[in-house]
């Protein structure tokens, strides 16, 4: 048991992509490429299952975190809910980027300026489907797509889950009693060098609506089966649900397992070798 729980720390893990649904694939691709500077990496249409996907990011999927957009035929809008927070993009000149997005017709919901109680300069924009993107000014950037923020009802419970089940490390924790919230940044490397999961706890709020727009985060692993065993053990201790037992996806043969954390947020673990084969 103890050896099994050590596995996530030894495993070669990386946040691969985040999956969410959009109402008009071409519109979103146009917005992300023109406003944010993302590149369209690959696209596929699956008419027999009535959906299409597009993968976009700031670099190749082998080394960068990307978004996987899903368009379901005939569905033009989704409920984002109040649990999903935002995605974040780092930039060396936030004022220039905001003006560029504004010129392209983007919806700026917070003008650039220091974060409350701090010095980091941020701004917020909304994409055509209503997803919020935070913009963060940083002097040095490895991968501009730097954060996925989700709200949770019990921060310590969530930290325990993600540390033990997924081997994520708490990189930074900030409590803001004046504004009644606490955040924790979790990742597989230094915050300025990797994409991180930001968990936010708002004082006294224990549940959020998930909506049907945001889907899941995908994380790479060297052993889907062993990783699933760990997750199963942690779920018994902290809470959560296995939603897909480990094994290959029919027709694709990529080995995956998926589960919900104690708040109902979904993660998919993907075999590293199979994932690279998919990209060829």
Image (cartoon, helix red, strand yellow):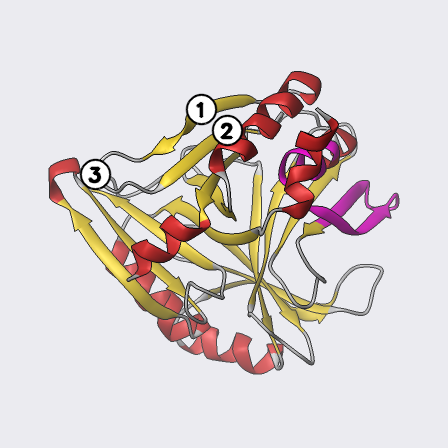
Locate residue 100, reporting x and y percent.
47, 79
Q: In the picture shown, does residue 41 fall above or below 45? A: below
Dividing the image into 4 quarters, which one contains the C terminus?
Answer: bottom left
Locate residue 177, reporting x and y percent.
88, 43
**Is residue 181 covered in magenta?**
yes
Dividing the image into 4 quarters, which one contains the N terminus?
Answer: top right
Q: In the picture shown, does residue 117 fall above or below 19? A: below
Which element carries disc 3, helix, strand or loop?
loop
* Span of residues in magenta: 160-185
Which quarter of the figure has residue 251? Answer: top left
For label 2, the residue is 259
Q: For the residues marked 2 and 1, what is the alpha-carbon distance in whole angstroms? A: 5 Å
Residue pictured at 64% horizontal, 34% vertical: 165
For label 1, the residue is 243
For label 3, the residue is 251
Q: For the residues marked 1 and 3, what is the alpha-carbon distance in whole angstroms? A: 19 Å
């Amino acid at each position: 048991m103890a050896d099994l729980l050590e596995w996530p720390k030894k495993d070669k893990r990386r946040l691969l992509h985040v999956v969410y649904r959009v109402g008009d694939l071409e519109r979103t691709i146009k917005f992300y490429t023109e406003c944010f500077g993302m590149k369209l990496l690959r696209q596929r249409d699956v008419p027999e299952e009535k959906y299409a996907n597009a993968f976009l990011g700031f670099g190749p999927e082998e080394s960068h975190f990307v978004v996987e957009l899903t368009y379901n035929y005939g569905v033009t809008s989704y409920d984002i809910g109040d649990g999903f927070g935002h995605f974040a993009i780092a930039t060396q000149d936030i004022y220039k980027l905001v003006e560029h997005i504004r010129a392209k017709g983007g919806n700026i919901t917070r003008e650039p300026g220091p974060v409350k109680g701090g010095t980091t300069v941020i701004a917020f924009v909304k994409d055509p489907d209503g997803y919020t993107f935070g913009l963060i000014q940083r002097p040095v950037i490895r991968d501009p797509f730097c954060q996925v923020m989700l709200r949770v009802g019990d921060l310590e419970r969530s930290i325990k889950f993600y540390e033990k089940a997924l081997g994520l490390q708490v990189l930074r924790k900030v409590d803001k009693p004046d504004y009644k919230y606490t955040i924790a940044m979790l990742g597989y490397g230094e915050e300025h060098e990797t994409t991180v999961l930001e968990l936010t706890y708002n004082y006294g709020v224990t549940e959020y609506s998930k909506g049907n727009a945001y889907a899941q985060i995908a994380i790479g692993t060297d052993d889907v089966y062993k990783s699933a065993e760990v997750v199963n053990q942690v779920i018994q201790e902290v809470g959560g649900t296995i939603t897909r037992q480990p094994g290959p996806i029919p027709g694709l043969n990529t080995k995956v397992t998926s589960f919900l954390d104690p708040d109902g947020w979904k993660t998919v673990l993907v075999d590293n070798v199979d994932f690279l084969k998919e990209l060829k």
